[in-house]
Amino acid sequence: MKDFHCCATCRHFLAEKKAEGMMYSCSRLGYETKPTYKFNCWNPKEHVNKLMNKKNMGHASG
């Protein structure tokens, strides 16, 4: 999870282009954030879940 855990990969992350530049926010927490920030409430997007599962399958031994 360490390779994927950040705001940019969370389903609550919003990116909005404004005249003064990009604004990043969390729809769950309700405040501005940055793509690289990490919070314990992280809920990965569906495609990120698939990537994590694929990566875990490649490392499984048995």
Image (cartoon, grey):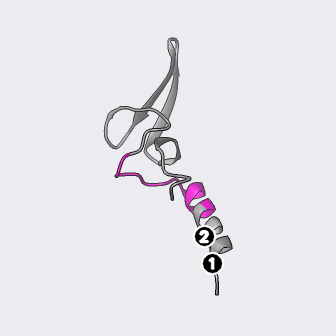
**Which residue type carries mark 2?**
Asn
Q: Secondary structure at mark 1?
A: loop
Specify whether 18 is left or right of 62: left
**Which residue type carries mark 1?**
Ala
Question: Residue 11, how many percent across, how many down?
Answer: 47, 48
- Residue segment shown in magenta: 39-51
Q: Residue at x 64, y 87 (%)?
A: 62
The relative height of residue 55 versus residue 40 in the rendered view (above or below) is below
> Which residue was labeled with disc 2?
56
Return the mark for residue 15. none
C-alpha distance separating marks 1 and 2: 6 Å
Question: Residue 39, how many percent across, how many down?
Answer: 37, 46
Is there CB contact under 8 Å for labels 1 and 2? yes
Question: Residue 9, how many percent across, how many down?
Answer: 52, 47
Q: Residue at x 43, y 39 (%)?
A: 37
> Which residue was labeled with disc 1?
60
In magenta segment, residue 61: no
Q: Residue 57 appears in which quarter of the rendering?
A: bottom right
Specify whether 51 is left or right of 13: right
